[in-house]
Image (cartoon, grey):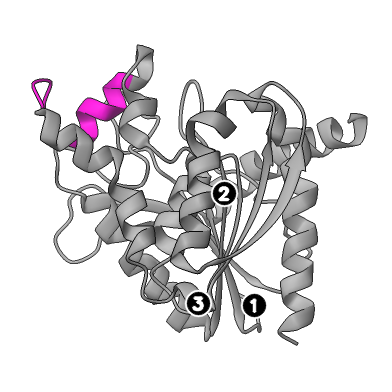
């Protein structure tokens, strides 16, 4: 645990140093609000695409230094499109799903730029939702995630998180149908995934914290029903935020395994 805390501190320092030097903006064809990102291309057939968690105060990149020594190209996408700056789950505001469109464009552009033929999507919690939402679009993809939310409407419909729900749906007086559509959006996409048989989800979670019962348990059933290969890493801690002590090492281990299989 001490080592993981030390590594998290180093990751925060490294990210704070690298962002001003390497952060870029992608506007797409017609968007006024840019998508911010970090891109580290290398001579590799693998592109790792990282999505950030839902932070308390502002959006920030995660796991930037965790994989910096791995011989893969890396793309980290920031999600700060929100009234409070914390993000919209890589979907977008005002019911437009404009951020989702920009992310898909950016991923394709970066994959083409670095010549990647294998895409790996990573993220924990909110980042896990993003990694699944984009990862299922690509044949042969791997998604390395930790304790993701699955029923997004349910998760956002309380406390300060409700501002993100209103941002995504576009209005305070959203209908029950609009809520349900968002709530089951990822589920419907997974169950209709045409590339499922070629994809693998590597998932870390704790069977003793609330995210398992509320989201992960049914996600696992749906992934397997869709025909996606699932590799599990199960912990037994009780606090959702404790995944940050376990996921980085798991992430690096799984990425290294994918590299060995794709040499």
Circle 3 sits on which residue? 197
Left or right placement of residue 158 versus residue 230 in this view: left
Circle 1 sits on which residue? 42
* Chain-order first, disc 2 or disc 1: 1
* Residue depicted at x 58% and y 24%: 210
Crowd tier of the residue under label 2, counting other residues whose Cα lies within 10 Å: few below 14, some 14–19, many 20 or above = many
Dot 1: what SS?
loop
* Residue depicted at x 79% and y 79%: 260
Q: Nearer the viewer, mark 1 or mark 3?
A: 3
- Residue stretch rendered in magenta on the structure: 162-174
132 in relation to 63, above or below? below
Counting from the top left corner in percent of width and height, residue 23 is at: 49, 53
* Chain-order first, disc 1 or disc 3: 1
CA distance separating discs 2 and 3: 22 Å
Counting from the top left corner in percent of width and height, residue 140 is at: 53, 79
Dot 2: what SS?
strand
Circle 2 sits on which residue? 123
């Amino acid at each position: 645990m001490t080592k993981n805390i030390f590594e998290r501190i180093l990751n925060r320092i490294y990210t704070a140093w690298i962002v001003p030097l390497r952060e870029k903006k992608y506007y797409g064809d017609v968007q006024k609000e840019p998508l911010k990102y970090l891109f580290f291309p290398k001579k590799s057939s693998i592109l790792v695409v990282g999505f950030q968690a839902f932070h308390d105060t502002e959006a920030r990149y995660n796991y930037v230094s965790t994989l910096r020594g791995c011989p893969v190209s890396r793309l980290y996408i920031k999600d700060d499109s929100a009234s409070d700056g914390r993000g919209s789950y890589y979907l977008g505001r005002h019911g437009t799903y404009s951020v989702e469109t920009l992310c898909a464009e950016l991923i394709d552009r970066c994959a083409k730029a670095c010549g990647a033929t294998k895409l790996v999507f990573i993220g924990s919690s909110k980042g896990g939702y993003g990694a699944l939402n984009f990862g299922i679009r690509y044949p042969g993809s791997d998604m390395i995630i930790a304790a993701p939310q699955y029923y997004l409407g349910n998760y956002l419909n309380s406390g300060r998180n409700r501002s993100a729900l209103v941002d995504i749906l576009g209005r305070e007086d959203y209908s029950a149908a609009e809520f349900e559509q968002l709530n089951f959006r990822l589920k419907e996409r997974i169950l209709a995934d045409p590339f499922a048989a070629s994809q693998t989800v590597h998932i870390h979670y704790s069977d003793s914290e609330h995210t398992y019962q509320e989201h992960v348990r049914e996600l696992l059933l749906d992934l397997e029903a869709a025909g996606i290969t699932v590799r599990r890493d199960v912990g037994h801690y009780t606090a959702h935020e404790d995944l940050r002590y376990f996921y980085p090492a798991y992430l690096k281990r799984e990425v290294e395994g994918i590299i060995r299989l794709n040499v």
